[in-house]
Amino acid sequence: GQQVMQIPQYQHVQEGEDFTTYCNSSTTLSNIQWYKKRPGGHPVFLIQLVKSGEVKKQKRLTFQFGEAKKNSSLHITATQTTDVGTYFCAGLNQGAQKLVFGQGTRLTINP
Amino acid sequence: DAGVIQSPRHEVTEMGQEVTLRCKPISGHNSLFWYRQTMMRGLELLIYFNNNVPIDDSGMPEDRFSAKMPNASFSTLKIQPSEPRDSAVYFCASRAPGLRNYGYTFGSGTRLTVV
């Protein structure tokens, strides 16, 4: 079945450093979504990417969808303590109805 | 809107007992999903419903797990009998109808501990 792999599993940075998490799917995706889960909280939808090669920005966050629609990345510029949490990618297979989540990347930040 | 509402927030039970988790999706959302989060396996989809009908329950671990959605505003996930390995955070999520391009809205989750 479809698998979504996400790396790294953990990332610790100094405040102000950049952060990137990568997501790879075993199958071509219809779209990919990104979620953020704060410690003790629940996943919150951030964004969806649909088009091949698409790039979207939300303030310091940049999301990319690969040309082959099988990989994606989330980059945070100049991290802040409010960025702490686990970032999940979730892929939707073409023709499917359910999202498959990656394992998540847990980001911790030294202030 | 109050969002997706789950209850209870925390549940501690003894092995062998029946556990029922509850979820109220956002009004107007017609898809409902049950996920389980563990350190080892991340977020796993257990089952999902469209218009109250179970569509895919291939993620349900075994016969001890069952889920129902008797109406558009309520769903339950039942574990009977519960086992220590069922300990996890269980999330319910819902999604608006129409295009498949909307993000899921998650509830706050139920942290289940089976001792």
Image (spheres, coloured by chain):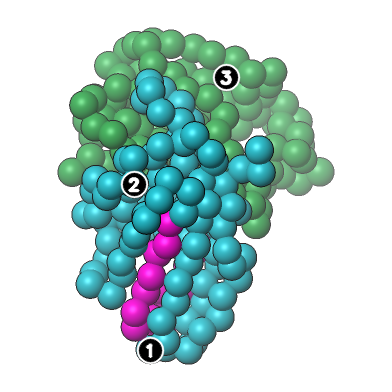
Chain colours: A green, B cyan
Of badges 2 and 3, the one in the foreground is: 2
Marks 2 and 1 sit apart, C-alpha to C-alpha, by 29 Å
Q: Is residue A59 left or right of residue B12?
A: right
Magenta span of residues = B75-89
* Residue A101 position in % (x across, y down): 39, 42
Query: Would residue B80 be counted in the magenta stretch?
Result: yes
User: On the image, numbered disc 2 is attached to which residue?
Assistant: B52
Q: Is residue A14 left or right of residue B76?
A: right
The crowd level at tag 2 (other Cα within 10 Å; few <14, some 14-19, many 20+) is some
Front in this rendered view, residue A77 or B52? B52
Tell me the SS state at disc 3.
strand
| Type of the residue with mark 3 | Thr
Q: Residue furthest front?
A: B71
Using the image, name the chain to which the residue with label 2 belongs.
B
User: On the image, numbered disc 1 is attached to which residue?
Assistant: B16
Using the image, name the chain to which the residue with label 1 belongs.
B
* Residue A24 position in % (x across, y down): 34, 32
* Residue A23 position in % (x across, y down): 40, 33
Quarter of the rendering containing residue A84: top right
Front in this rendered view, residue A54 or B89? B89
The crowd level at tag 1 (other Cα within 10 Å; few <14, some 14-19, many 20+) is some
Marks 3 and 1 sit apart, C-alpha to C-alpha, by 47 Å
Q: In the rendered image, which quarter contains the N terminus of chain B? A: top right
Q: Is residue B30 depicted above or below A9 in this figure?
A: above
Tell me the SS state at disc 1.
loop
Q: Residue furthest right?
A: A111
User: On the image, numbered disc 3 is attached to which residue?
Assistant: A62
* Residue B71 position in % (x across, y down): 40, 50
Q: Is residue B2 depicted above or below B78 in this figure?
A: above
